[in-house]
Amino acid sequence: MISEITNILHFFSIGGLISLLIFFVSRYWYDLRGRIAVCFILTIVSYLILNLDVHIQIPFLVRNLLFLVVLALPFFYWLITLAAFDDHFEIKTWFWFLLIGKLILSAVATYPELGQISLRGPVESERILSRILLPSIFSLGFVLAAIIQTYIGRKDDLVESRRTLRQIHILISGTVIAINIFSHLFLRGKEVSEILDLLNGLLAWGLILAFQFLMFDLKEGLIQKREGAAEEEKAPAVDPVLQKKLIDAFEKEKMYRSEGLTIRSLAEELQVHEYKLRRLINGNLGFRNFNDFLNRYRIQEACEILLDSEKDEIPVIRIAMDLGYQSLGPFNRAFKELTSLTPTEYRKNRAEPKINLNDFEKSKLK
């Protein structure tokens, strides 16, 4: 009975995933994040199909193809996490080496026993367990990296829908994967395993429904909209008192120079609710991440210093520290991202600067 309910949940999940698949292909295929989401959904659908094949009745060649797709699931779980929560995400070459390494390791380890491996229930055979243990640990590494990445970026995220998605991502998806690995690798006993499979199915279905809500309810901020494809949304009403406080804090008091400044500490300093400050910086000023907002001010002042020939004696690292950076690396990365030059190159080329200081648009606050 429990197994039949689990199967029904899996069919519901597959239906929900197919609707999400159609949604991403039809509306967001132009965006890299949309294409990654499509790949991730395909890996989950393949997993659920194999999970339904309790008695291993799928033709061998089809089963091989589905397994190959499933082997990439942890990689795309990690990749979609980076893509969804990092505004400056781009695929690095070494990402693909990780995927190839994962596929080769898993294929070599599991292929000899592929006809005996079922994704439903515990692994009773010690021989099969020894084959899948190392690939499973590799997969767990991707999952942990994704959850850690989601957690550490939550404080600076200014997009409300994305902050909600972070909580769902950590709590539900992490639990689903933990239950899956625990029940499949370490649990013994059919009855307990079936209960955990059912719980896993319920959580997975709930996760899919949550994603459907976030996508189909047209929540903002998850994927960049195509330019000109939709009507310009009306910005939220500006709180003039809060805006003046923020202007004074950054324009007069230079609070952006404070080392370790966070959205929470800034809200406390301004004596306002954190969510109101997030709304102002994101909704009215257009910044999706608090660090981007900080860097805009810090790098503008750095440019002003580097363009001043009377301040040539000030080393770059001193400029970085004075502006609130804890080390030179983050300063150099932020500077190059905004100016396309390193600080040293910018100073050398100040006769013909590659960036206009007006591009920083401090006037947006006024």
Image (tube, helix red, strand yellow):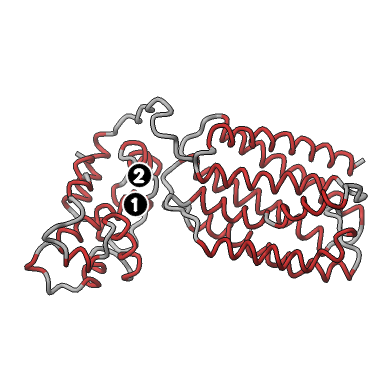
Against 146, residue 21 (above or below) is: above
Q: Nearer the viewer, residue 8 or 132?
A: 132
Against 13, residue 137 (above or below) is: below
Can you give x and y, in whole percent of width and height, for residue 138 in the image? Answer: 68, 66
What residue appears at the point 47 percent right and 35 percent down from the top-left corner? 220
For label 1, the residue is 292
Q: Secondary structure at mark 1?
A: helix
Q: Are marks 1 and 2 in contact (CB under 8 Å)?
A: yes
What residue appears at the point 87 percent right and 47 percent down from the top-left corner? 53
- Amino acid at pointer 2: Phe
Q: Secondary structure at mark 2?
A: loop
Can you give x and y, in whole percent of width and height, for residue 202 in the image? Answer: 75, 42
Quadrant of the image occupied by residue 323: bottom left
Q: Which residue is most to the front?
A: 61
Mark 1 or mark 2: whose residue is earlier in sequence: 2
Mark drawn on residue 326:
none
Mark drawn on residue 287:
2
Q: Nearer the viewer, residue 64 or 194?
A: 64
Q: Which residue is most to the left?
A: 310
Can you give x and y, in whole percent of width and height, for residue 209 in the image? Answer: 66, 36
What residue appears at the point 84 percent right and 67 percent down from the top-left corner? 129
User: Dot 2: few (<14), some (14–19), or many (≥20) neighbours within 10 Å?
Assistant: many
Q: Is residue 233 left or right of residue 29?
A: left
Q: Disc 1 versus disc 2: distance between alpha carbons?
A: 7 Å
Q: Is residue 33 left or right of residue 201?
A: left
User: Which quadrant, please, contains the N terminus?
Assistant: top right
Can you give x and y, in whole percent of width and height, for residue 31 in the image? Answer: 49, 41
User: Which quadrant, please, contains the C terminus?
Assistant: top left
What residue appears at the point 63 percent right and 59 percent down from the top-left corner? 143
- Amino acid at pointer 1: Asp
User: Dot 1: few (<14), some (14–19), or many (≥20) neighbours within 10 Å?
Assistant: some
The number of callouts visible is 2
